[in-house]
Amino acid sequence: MTKVVQAQINGILIRVPEGTTILEAAKQVQIKIPVLCKHPDLPPEASCGICIVRIKGTNKMLRACCTPVENGMEIITHDPEIIEIRRTVIELILSNHPNDCLKCQRNNDCELQRLTADFGIHSESFPTFLRDIPKDYSTNAIDLDPVKCILCGRCVHVCQNQQNVWALSFLERGMQTRISPAGDIQLADSPCVRCGQCAAHCPTGAIVEKDDTGIVWNALQNKEKYCVVQMAPAVRASIGETFGQIGVNYTKKLYALLRRLGFKAVFDTSFGADITIMEEASEFEERLLKQTRPLPLITSCCPSWVDFMEKFHTDMIENFSSCKSPHEIIGVLSKTYYAEKFKIDPSKIFMVSIMPCTSKKYEIQRSSEMFASGFQDIDAVLCTRELGRMIKQAGIDFENLPEEQADSILGEYSGAGVIFGSTGGVMEAALRTAHYLITGRELEHVEFESVRGLERVKETEVEIDGMKIRVAIAHGLSSVEYVLEKIRQAKLNNTEIPYHLVEVMACPGGCVGGGGQPYMVTDELRVKRAKALYSDDKDKEIRFSHQNPYIKRLYEEYLGKPLGEKSERLLHTTYVPQPLYRK
Amino acid sequence: MENINTEEIKSLIQKWKGKDGNLVMILHEIQNRYGYVPRPVSLEVSKETGIPLARIYEVITFYNYFELCPPAKHTISVCMGTACYLKGAPELLEEIETLLHVQEGQSTEDGQFHVNVVRCLGCCGLAPVVSIDGKIFGKVKKSEIMEILSRYTHEENNVKV
């Protein structure tokens, strides 16, 4: 049992497990200690000094974010002197920060701005010193403006530790310290996989998603264009946070919203996920029963994971599913199948994807196969945060919108399609259909509890027709190493493969925790977002991709069969090793 | 830049492999060998040791001792000590910066000159003082700078011929 320590915060007695920080303990007595560098999702960096508190009887000020409560401590979190020191800390940070909030992408949604307002700072107390560091717009997914950086260290931590990518680091020291892509080059020339975890954790406007709302507004105004849209599973579970609603599934209101924004047809990426499953499960069946290509089969719907593999783990290329990601599939089908059926000139179609993801912005041009329709299959990608801004710009009372349906033939999804947005979801959806493909029978229990949840690596065994299928699920790129190493060792020693099927998502929690999702994500929030998707699945009449009547129709009318000639041409892609450093 | 000898770097890394804090030691050897840490060498170190380039550059830029650019052929030090300052050193520095198209602390693009500011060279009687590769030029006038610098560029030309 953990030891309990007893202390006082502002004169109120607290009892907390040993190791609890002062910051955490203070919440028990309804005290919010202000923080800036500390993100609730990450370990303390202790770089800013705003959370200082006083211990009675000493002159010392301690940082609440990284100081554990000790027995008998008498902690004071707020007094006039503490408040004055905190104000000075903010003023010093502001003296190195550009004063252009009105034109900043984080305006009204910035942690530094919020603190400045809370502390009532109305003038410059110190002369401003700004450094001349160039902006970096090289990736087409993430924009870097190191001058706005307050050196909190969150992005460096997520990039190096959580994601194991090592694209970002601090360079130089003291006053000269700055964030920079690996070895002072452009982000696009670095190992960056565009996951956007840095942007999702940045407290200011130093790292933001590339804003494509302007491109989309222009297309919506252009009478020559036929604008269509799709939205990813994870967006429906998080867009509510823009309006203070947590864990609510807004699927049907989003359909209505997107029509009101001016889109002529509204599709659902979850339907694309159903197609991915048809292709991927068939690929799995083929590899398992006919040994056409090596096992394990590794999922490939996450573009950051694909990028990571092409840079760091090229020996896994033959294990990768060649199937495109769900939104790319909807993209190519909107400009082929849908265009043909509704007699729309595909060159006029402007396809927008609403994604929880910054990497999808890069994916739409990642290879020539992303132009399989003869045009760029996806014209623009907006992440959840950008959609949130568009809703406000459009003046739509989102929460009171009526509920609508998606446009059929690319809109009706099964329960299996919507759980793609959570870690383990692709695995579960694939297993449901693979079971049918292998045995010819439907599963009695559709839910695979053992592949759900936020454990960073999940390993389990599923029995299909007497065969033991070993699976692994990893999320957060630093968790991948363990799984890949096991596969490598088995290859090397010529022993039995450790897994048959592996799912990887670059972001912790999967897409619900994506780099384009609303700010301040924690595991608690990831669980709530995922729960919204799992209940959507549970409420669905059809919970298997292969049972979706629109999927059947698509293959009957257009594609032929999974892995058939047409499917291969439109729905599949290839992978090539990429250099880690381009300069 | 001279050619990078991959074998040499590999054996140098081998010497420190598996030892704690080996990155700094490896970088020291490289700095001693080349006079700076060339980027291709950093990439080689990253490949051989598995240490990400980001970490290698964190260390290189953290310590003043490590350089990322090759040392210039000639080092110009302009004294900004009190006496030199009052006798017009800022004007000399400005002239040097204009003529060579560099800022203080930088090297010229052709790698010929590095321009430094120093505090007192110990010969205030000769103020304002400029030193090039340790040779002292005293009571320097702005108009003489061009001629002084040209001695070094000419010397360079002679060597080339």
Image (cartoon, coloured by chain):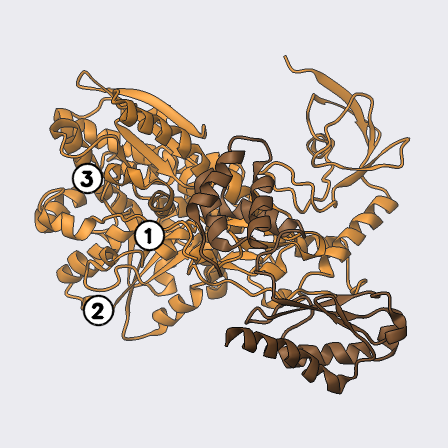
Residue at mark 2: A347
Q: Nearer the viewer, residue B150 or B62?
A: B150
Direction from residue A111 to residue A377 in the image, left or right: left
Residue at mark 1: A404
Residue A164, percent across and down? 47, 40
Residue at mark 3: A278
Based on the displayed image, in which of its 4 quarters is residue A500 positioned? top left
Q: Nearer the viewer, residue A60 or B62?
A: B62
In the rendered structure, which disc, 3 or 2, sits on the residue that comes first in sequence? Answer: 3
Where's the N terminus of chain A, which quadrant? top right
Residue appearing at x 65%, y 38% in the figure: A44
Task: Give the Cα distance between marks 3 and 1.
Answer: 27 Å
Looking at the picture, does residue B8 appear above or below residue A497?
below
In the rendered structure, which disc, 3 or 1, sits on the residue that comes first in sequence? Answer: 3
Q: Which chain's colour is brown? A: B
Q: Nearer the viewer, residue A195 or A112?
A: A195
Q: Which chain's colour is orange? A: A
Based on the displayed image, in which of its 4 quarters is residue A33 positioned? top right
Rate crowding at label 2 as few (under 14), some (14 to 19) or many (20 or more) other CA atoms within 10 Å.
Answer: some
Is disc 1 in the same subunit as disc 2?
yes
Label 3 close to label 1 by CB (< 8 Å): no
Kindly identify the amino acid type of the residue bearing the numbered disc 3.
Met
Kindly identify the amino acid type of the residue bearing the numbered disc 1.
Glu
